[in-house]
Each structure stands twice: as structure tokens, then as C-alpha cells.
Image (cartoon, grey):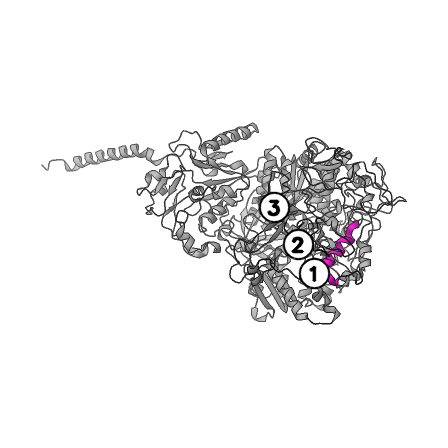
Amino acid sequence: MPGLGTSFGRGGSTTFLQDLQNADCILIEGSNFAEAHPVGFRFVVKAKERGATIIHVDPRFTRTSALADHYVPIRSGTDIAFLGGIINWVLTNNRYFREYVVAYTNASSIVVDTFKGTEDLDGLFSGFHGGDTGLTAMSHYGGAAQGRDSIGGYDTETWQFEHDDGGAVKRDDTLQHPRCVFQILRRHFSRYTPEMVERVCGTPQNLFLLVCETLAKNSGRDRTTAFAYAVGWTQHTVGVQYIRTAAILQMLLGNVGRPGGGVMALRGHANIQGATDIATLYDLLPGYLPMPSIERNEQTLADYLKINTKRTGWWSNLPKYVISQLKAFYGDAATKENDYCFDYLPQLTGDHSTIPTTFAMKDGVVKGYFVIGQNPVTSGQNTGLIAASMDRLQWFVNIDSYENESSSFWKREGADPTKIGTECFFLPAATVLEKDGTMTNTNRLLQFHDKAVEPAGESKSDLWYLYELGKRLKKLYAGSTQPKDRPILDMTWDYEHENERERKRGEPSASRVMQEINGYVVATGEQLKDFTECRDDGSTACGGWIYSGVYPDKNTNRARSRKGDAWTALEWGFAWPSNRRMLYNRASADPDGKPWSERKKYVWWDEQAGEWTGVDVPDFAKTKAPNTPATAGASGMDAHSGADPFIMQLDGRAQMFVAGPLKDGPLPAHYEPLASVIHNQLYSQQHNPSLKEFRRRDNPYNGSVNAEYPYVLTTYRITELSGIFTRYIPWLAELQPEAFCEIDPELAVQKGIRNGEYVTLTTAVGEIEARALVSGRMKPLRIADGKRVHQIGLPYLYGNFGFTKGDTSGDLISLSMDPNVSIHEAKTFTCDIRAGRRDRRTGPLLQDSPVPADEQIPDGQPQTHGIDQLKTERT
Amino acid sequence: MSTGFFTDTTLCIGCKACEVACKQWNELPSDGFAFTGMSYDNTVHLSGTTWRHVAFVENVQMDPQGLSDHWSMMSDVCKHCTHAGCLEACPTGAIIRNEFDNVYIQPDVCNGCGYCVPSCPFGVVDMIGQVASNAAYNVATLNQERRERDETAVQGRGGVAGKCTLCYDRQRDGFIPACAKACPTESIQFGDVDELKARAHERAQTLKERGLDASLYGVGWDSSVGDLNAFFLLTDRPERYNLPPEPVLPSTRQPAGYGAAAAAALVMFACGLAIFGRSPS
């Protein structure tokens, strides 16, 4: 999400599925598109039928590869090297779209002279400090307890641009200045040669060059290439930088904001986009507003606004959205005098995402746990640790439609329920067909759905549970005069159903929740037409500004509209922001506002009408002419010219070089995964120095280049199964009836493994068993120094409940995190394999015993990996 | 009007949505939970309770260059033959050709003799075993009342022959069959057979121009089963998809069979004469 956000301005897919049919080439990498998104894949098939070239880069030959024109194998965890290689090829062969690059990206911006890159510092950027060093060996136990102070990372002062006296970024439109981004990019990627790509990724050079040529041939004025990725790019300790690499490449090729182009972020679940938009993430308020943080010293509203409001670009409007949101949260209690109740909001004291919280549970710091619509004991990593940490809770609430491995963690193999003191509550949830609500799909498209049938038995909607919980808390605290109870008492909490029958059942109204998210004028109660009506004086309330416009009046829910067509379908549902289907679509026209070509026409400037027009809602001020100059020294949108399409950014341009917010570098660099089979071929720095680790005995690491774990393992989902509910459906379960892993015939022969029989996979964390599926679709690769790499594929969605059963891959994977979004690294790690079944678990696992106090880290906070000492190790 | 399917294997992504949609609409139980190790195919073949089946044909080398790698998928189904062996063999008249020109088994007339099973040249028809327990059904389909009411679709009682009905009940209500409705890539197309054939010829031509070895299976061929109302576009030999290259209607073997039987009877008679016909002298 920050990969796209820092590059282009918004953390959402830049394009939409239906537009893929207009692509001349589609590069699918980090995604098994056909299997995980079969319905969306129809547009890839359509593109292919129209003559587009489909390329699939993946460790496995999958059903996506079967439909692609070219399948390109790659070693799991090396996509930055692969894409960086393409960037280098595009730059050295002058195949970039120069006009686009000069006008719409920050390639011409000049970086301060104190900046040093990976070429100067052998794999590091300037500004790295602290952190623990050099622990790439196998055992990471021990180490004194560390507070937040010792956590290292990058200072970003040297990753800034030079500014002129008016405050504008200095540029060199000839792209010749040695410190302009373009030249830095050239130097940075110069060692990512085709030979190096083959050494690192195992991809044969001829296939790699075929990809380069195909992408370049299908980009430019007349042609466009789209990229599609999914969690195969995100679940890595450098995941954000994977997406950054793709973003830079698409900028160089000039494919963003144009039909058939863009970066299609395929979301892993039906409503995962909605869950981040109206935010279930610990560090965000709805609409991507930052959660106040004590570390950034945002104790008052004034401090918060000062730190987070940008002087130029769309984020200059932040105060309007924050204050309107506080009005939506706290209603009449929020006044100018009391900072609109800003101090009711919790303040972040560190990383409180799920992984650190799990450690805090294990250490007895966190005592209660709500799990709603999730199943961490199978879909999490180091699941033995997760289950063990749940043993130590005082109470645990699970709201789900089916009994699952988390709701019944105390039934797991080897556990002794008589010794577990956790009080467990399992509440039955209505399924999607049994309740009203919206889903926001991968297109950023909101679609409302009505209840089709009554929930079975005593099941209730998730909304009912949360609404009821709020009502009961309010009742519990009613009459309290203590200031600390004011946030609960002042919270607006009125979502009574319009329908009397539903109201009697206690069911809240999903529509009224949506109306509040859309926003309204406080004085009149009228709905806001759009987020442009939000004010920073408390006269408007708006729960989530990006969704504003979905409910423009009390009788119009645009998420309900269903008028389709074959392309943009503007009357089908509502896409945020402002119903725009393709983001940054101003870039589909040249700086003068004319389409780059007739074939790739999308949004353009209509001279006569004096406005932007086209097949989509323009992502630009409607009447701002292309020749409007930027006003020197201005703030807000006036600082952008009429030719700056990336309106969320400070300078209105796509960012090849990101100054600031990312914690692992302004440019992407290839680092090996935390568990890897070779040394980094590009730098002495083996791993991302900023990645987060938990060095404890209940979370052991395989370590790099450990001969005990010689094989690469990657995890994924398959079409037939997704979560717990699919395992309970016999029609799905019979299609993939048991946990299996895919291995290549050569490895099978070496290890005496027969197709269809059991194998056992082991890592430092644990062992699991699965059936072997031996197939030439898994291809051993030859990497650096002739080393042969075998990769093993393992679907991760099995468990003990349902008709299809098996061990979960989460039992194998130790916990580590990407520094930006705290995602685990489940898409690539190492293991050993042997024929036969594992031993039954009869007693406690290593995760079950508490760790000594000196190994515990306060609040489960992670440690920074730090600088590797590979030079000495590498002789 | 004859209705049928055109299944274009070049568009199939192997998602098995057709298999699941078919089972859901027709309320068919699962066939059990056994891992086969045969590519991604764990239902293996059509059966009395699996009326759509996606075959996975791997033709993949370990070589990372893999330029000739193929993983073909095909959604197999009852062919609804012009001259249907099952229909000819049925002694009770349970198997009929309905108003849509589809071959249809009436479950309430079928007496479970099983003659149709070996009479199908494609091995499509099979007996539905006694359904062991309701556990094999989805919770949502445990609606006894509906199952009893809707007898055309429900074969859950077992003991009768079962195969694709071409969603007779849906067609009568103006809906297209569940599998075609669920297919995300239009690999399964439903409609008037003549129209589908025209479309298929055009499609095969386009693919040939792209250099693919595309052929239509079950259209305009010289076979005793006649053209198939559910036909396929293939890019490999039919055997690779487990389809008979030259299907033969069992009844065409009848003259030869009767002839052989008559000849055998004559020989037996002659032998009898030779042994017992001698005078006891």
C-alpha cells in the first residue's frame, strides 16, 4: 500500500480490472491471477484474445502460466533483482518514454549532495544508524531486553530534494545533472545486468531479455503495458520496495494513468481494500489519516495538523478531513474550544500491529483478544506461537460463522485443555448473504448488498455485535463524571434501523453507517455531495473522506446502482475517490491536454467547453487548463501546474525517488529474504537492514545459507479453497481434499519421494506433513556459481476443521516484519524435506514454554535487523 | 431448436467453477475426499454425481526454458449425442430426448437396471450409489422439502442412473445451465447448436491463423454417434483429454454380433450333430 502511495499518491490500485482488456501486454508477477482471481482474469483472457502478450513471472508454472504467452521462472524472493534488471535494460537501451518521464515524474528533480546510495555504501543508503548488527547466523536467541530507544533505522535528512528560494524543487529537464533522480537511478541500477539477473533469480537470460523487449515494444504513445501483482509481492521483508520497483518501471515506460496501463493491485480478500480504507489498521484512521502518535509528539490537534498537513498538493486539505472526522465521531461534544475532542483519540506508542501484539500476549502483557472474521491459528505465521499466546489470555472472543482452528485453539494436537485458563466465547456470525453491507473490491469499487435470507439460528451480523457492544458500554458508563470515560459517553452511536422489524431485532442500519461515512452538514443534516464540501471549522461531519459522495443525499446510495457497460461502467457502484475508475488519468493526455494517441484516448482537455472530459471522471480539477502555470511559493493545489497529474503529491508528479516516508530507502535495492539459500550477489548487505525481527527462543530463524534447510519454500492459495468456510463445503473440499506440496521430479528422486505419498517439511520453527504432488511444473533453477535451487510450493489454507484437512504452513514460518507495514514474510523461506509422515504431537512445542524475562521485549516490540557482516563471512 | 454446449478448451483456466455450480444447482453430493496426485484433478472422471469434470493434462518439462510447456484444462460433460447409446439401451423409456433435443434421464422412471452405463461410448453415464449420509451435502441444501418437490433435478436418493441434464429445469424457466453461467472466461458457451457450431468454426479458424492446431471434436464427423450437441474445441489429440478418438455407437455392432451368435449356434448345432447324431450302431 505505501509502495503505491509514496510513488503515485494513493494506496490503491491505479487501474481497474475491466481496463486490463485494453492492454497490449500484461506482466503478471507476484500473483497467481487465474487461480486467485478467476473472475477478474476474464479481462486478461479478453486482452489476450485482442492480441495482447501475457507474461507470467513466478516460481511455479501455475494455471496462470498455462494461459500466458510466456512463462518465466524466477527464484522466490528475488523480484527486485528481476524488475531492477528491466529498469537497467530500459535505461541503457534508451527505451523509456522520455516526454512522459520528464513531464510527469520527478526524474528531473535534484537530490541534496549529502545523499549516498547503495553503490557508494555497498548496499546501504546514507543515514543508517543503530540496530543490532551482523546476526545472520542460525541462532538468534539471547540479547538483552531492549527498549524502543535502541531500535535502529534510517534518518532521512539526506534523502531530500534541493529547493529554490520559492520553495519549489530544483529540476534539470535535460536529465543530465549528476544528482538528478534520473542519473541516480542509472547509477543505482547499473549493476542489475542480465547476467546478474540470471545469477540471482535463476531466470535464463534469453527469457529475461524477451520480457524486456516485450515490455518496451508495448509501451509508449500508441501502446500500453499493465502490471498485475498480489500478495506474492507484499509478504516479504522488502515487500513495499517490490511494488516501488514496479512503479518506477511503469513510470519509465509511461504507463500510469493510461488505458491498458497502470499497476493493478489484486487484493487477497473480497473486502480487503475496504478494510484498509475504513480502517482496521492500527496506525490509520478511516480515509488514510494517520493515527496520532506520541513518538511524533502529536499531543494536541495543532501539533498533529502541523506535522501531518502538507503545504502543497491535495494533502493540504488534511485539517478539513480530520476535523470533520472528529465531528462524526463525537458530534456536539466536539467543539473548536476542546480541539474537537482530539485528545480522546488513542496515541500510538509503538508498533501495535498483530505480530508484536501476539508476542505481548505471550508475555502476558495483553490479556484479552477479539478475533472477528479471521483465523490467525491457520493463516498467521509461527502458528504454534499464536496458539500458545492465546493459552495465556484471560478472555478470548471469536465471532465467526464456523468453528475454526482459532475458536477452538485449545483442541489443537498436543494441547492439554485442562491447563489452559483462557475464558473463550464463540459467537455465531451471519454470513454475507444474511446481512446488509458493502464490499470494496480490488477496483476500489463499493458495492452494496442486501440481506437475502435470515441468519441461521442465533447468528447476528458483525455490525450487530459491534453496535450492541458500543450500546452496552455506553450504558455501563452512563452517569460517570470521570474525564477518562468521556470518549465512550460522547461517541455518536445512533444507527437504528429504518425498518421497524429489523429495529425490533436490534439490527443496526448499514445504510446509516454509510451515510455517516459519506458525511453531512452539521447544522442541517444534509448529506455532503463530495469531500470538497468538508470544512475545518466543525460545520461538517465526515466519517471517511475518501468515500464521500457515495451517499450524496439521504435517498441515493450510489453503491447500489447497477448499470453496467463493457468498460468504465460509471453507473455500476461507486469507486473512491469521486467515482474515478482510473487514478491519475490526467496522465492519459500529454502536457498540452491532448491524448497521447487516438488509440490510447481516455481523458483530455476540451478547449471549447473549457474542461477536462473523457470516458472516466477526470482525476484533476475539472476546469484547470493544461497551460495553467504553477504559482511560485503558493500552497495547496495552486503549487501544481495544469500539467501535474499526480495531485496527491507535493510536486504533482509520480515519485521515482521517494524523499522521506519509507523506512528502507528512497529507491529499491535487492536484499535476500530472511531465510535464503544464497548470499546476496549484489551487495555485502545480506538482508534489508531495516527489517524487523523477534529474536526469542519461541521464534527461531532458519538463518541465511544454512545447509540444514537447503530448499526454497513458497506459500499460496488455490482456486478451490480460501478460508475456513470453503473447507466446510464438500463440493470445494472434494476438489483439493488434503494438504499437499508441489515438488520437482529431480528433488523427488533425490529424496525418495513418490507422487501422492506423504512428506514432512521442517524448519527451525516446526514440522508439518503434506501429500507430495510431483510435477515438472516446478522447475529447478541454476543460480550463482552453478548452484541448483529446488523450490517447493505449499498451499497454506489447511487446518483441522472441515472436510478437507491438513497441517498449516504457518507452523513452519518464523515471524519477521517489513519495516513499513509490519507484514510477515510468508512468501519465501527455506526448509528441509523428507519422505514419510511426521511424529504426532503429544506434548508442548517449543513455543509453549514462556521465554525468560531477559529475552522478552517490552510490548512485543521488534528489533531492527541492522548491518550485516557478510564481508568477513564471505571470504 | 436443439440446445447444447460449445466448450472451448483454449479459454479454460481450470477454476472448476462449472463443477461446483453444477453440484450446487443440482444438489449433488461430493464423491468423497481422496487425494489422487494426478495434477489438480481429484474428482478424476464424470460420475453419476459429477456431471461436469475438469480434466488437467500436464505436458511440462523440468527445463526452465519451458518453451513447449502446456498445461491443458478441459471441462468434460455429457455429449448429448445425436444417436445416444444410453437412450437406445434404456428398456424402460426413462431416457428420452426432451423438447430441447437434450438426452435426459427421468429419475422417477429409471428402474436402475444400468444398461445405459456400458452403452455410452464416452463413459459418461453412471449409477448413483446410495448416498451415504447428509454430511456429504452442503448445509444449505439440507432442505428435504425442496428436494422432494423438485424431482427433475434431484437424484439424491440414489439407485438410478445419473448424468448431465443440461439443466433441464433451468432451461424450462429461461435460464442458461449453471456451468455456463458460472464460467468466468466463456470457455463454456450455451445456446442453439447450429449457432454454436458456426461460432466454433470461426473460432477454430482464428486459432489456426495464430498457429494453433485447433480442431472441433464432435462436429461434422463421420461417427455412428452422429454430431455431439455438447462439442469441444481441442488443441491436442482427443486421447490426451481422455476422449475416444473414434467413438462407436454400441448398436452398430449388433448386426455383426447377431451374425457371430448365429454362426456360433450353427457351429454348436453341427458339433451336436457330429457328437450325438451318429447312429448307436
Q: Does A495 appear in magenta?
A: no
Query: Spatial distance from mark 1 to mark 3, Cα to Cα?
Result: 42 Å
Q: Tell me which amino acid carries mark 1.
A: Pro
Q: Residue furthest front?
A: A524
The spot of residue A593 in percent (x, y) is 76, 34
Instruction: Name the quadrant containing residue A58.
Output: top right
The residue singled out by tag 1 in the image is A356
Query: Where residue A226 sits: x, y (%)?
Result: 67, 39
> Of helix, strand and loop, which one carries label 3?
loop
Instruction: Look at the magenta stretch and give its main secondary structure.
Output: helix
Pointers 2 and 3 in contact (C-beta within 8 Å): no
Tell me the distance, in whole angstroms, between the alpha carbons under discs 2 and 3. Answer: 16 Å
Q: Mark 3: give few (<14), some (14-19) or many (20+) Cα within 10 Å.
A: some
Q: Which residue is mark 3?
A: A561
* C-alpha span from label 2 to label 1: 35 Å
Say which label, 1 or 3, has the lower sequence index: 1
